[in-house]
Amino acid sequence: MGTTLREVIFDIGGGIKGDGNFKAVQIGGPSGGCLITPHLDVSLDFDSLKKMGAMIGSGGLVVMDDNTCMVEVARFFMNFTQNESCGKCVPCREGTKRMLEILERIVAGNGTLEDLDLLEELATTITETALCGLGKSAALPVMSTLKLFRDEYIEHVVEKKCASHTCSALRRFVISPELCKGCSKCARNCPVGAISGKIKEPFTIDDSVCIKCGACESSCAFGAIRIEA
Ligand code: SF4
Ligand code: SF4
Ligand code: SF4
């Protein structure tokens, strides 16, 4: 109690793994909120965290680097709390299910701007009317990511892009003509026949057939296949 988030993450925890940069920390367990760099000097105690829309909760910290998709983070935690919902009261039983459906729609590239308003409306209703602590805090990861990373939600629903390449439905696999040797290995590994070309000439991927499995990228020995958001 009283130690700052910065000390816990960087001094005690050893900081960010690899060469990524700190992006956010999800604090308090699956129904906790997210905090970002300006919050790092917050003292870890009940009142200070509550003021920032987070909580100590179970005491867990999930530290994320800048390769993390915050929309997927919200979906992941909503999936967990939805599974945990006992079903006794309607707001939590039905509301978390509807929120999860919306988040799944967004990460699949089928979300709309109206979905963001709906998420906020559902989050407020569930928080105010659910019977127990699980339901009352279930929407916190969604609310905090919508507040702090709204641009990522908008990127998913408007541009149909996931900058971190996390959401597989929004990834696009592209063969670089300069690097491709025309060996055909990717085409032979593609499960849906989305890749075509002539031997010793650059191959191409048909986006309308590709199911974004990633098999081609890992099979190319020349690094000719890249993922675009
Ligand atoms: S809020 Fe509590 S009581 Fe209501 S469904 Fe969720 S877990 Fe059950
Ligand atoms: S595996 Fe790589 S080099 Fe061979 S055809 Fe595919 S993209 Fe080109
Ligand atoms: S990502 Fe999968 S489906 Fe798409 S082109 Fe590559 S191997 Fe084929």
Image: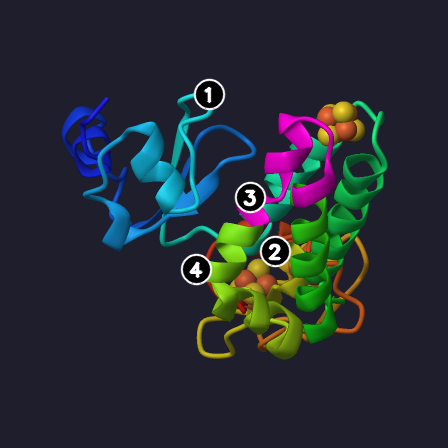
Distance between mark 1 and mark 4 Cα atoms:
22 Å
Which residue is disc 2 drawn over?
A: 167
SS type, badge 2: loop
Residue at image x 58%, y 50%?
Answer: 142
SS type, badge 3: helix
Q: Amino acid at mark 3?
A: Leu
Earlier residue among tags 3 and 4: 3
Q: Does residue 45 appear left or right of residue 139 in this picture?
A: left
Within 10 Å of disc 1 (Cα), the crowding (few <14, some 14-19, many 20+) is: few
> From which residue to which does the magenta span run?
128-142
Earlier residue among tags 1 and 4: 1
Q: Is residue 36 visible?
A: yes
Mark number, residue 140? 3
Distance between mark 3 and mark 4 Cα atoms:
12 Å
The front one of 117 and 74 is 117
Earlier residue among tags 1 and 2: 1
Task: Name the image quarter holding the N terminus.
Answer: top left
Residue at image x 56%, y 34%?
Answer: 31
Q: Amino acid at mark 4?
A: Leu
Q: Is residue 220 visible?
A: no
Which residue is disc 1 drawn over?
A: 58
Q: Amino acid at mark 2?
A: Cys
Q: Please say which color scheme the image uses.
A: rainbow
SS type, badge 1: loop
* Label 1 C-beta lies within 8 Å of the nearest ligand 1 atom: no
Distance between mark 1 and mark 3 Cα atoms:
14 Å
Which residue is disc 4 drawn over?
A: 148
Distance between mark 3 and mark 2 Cα atoms:
21 Å
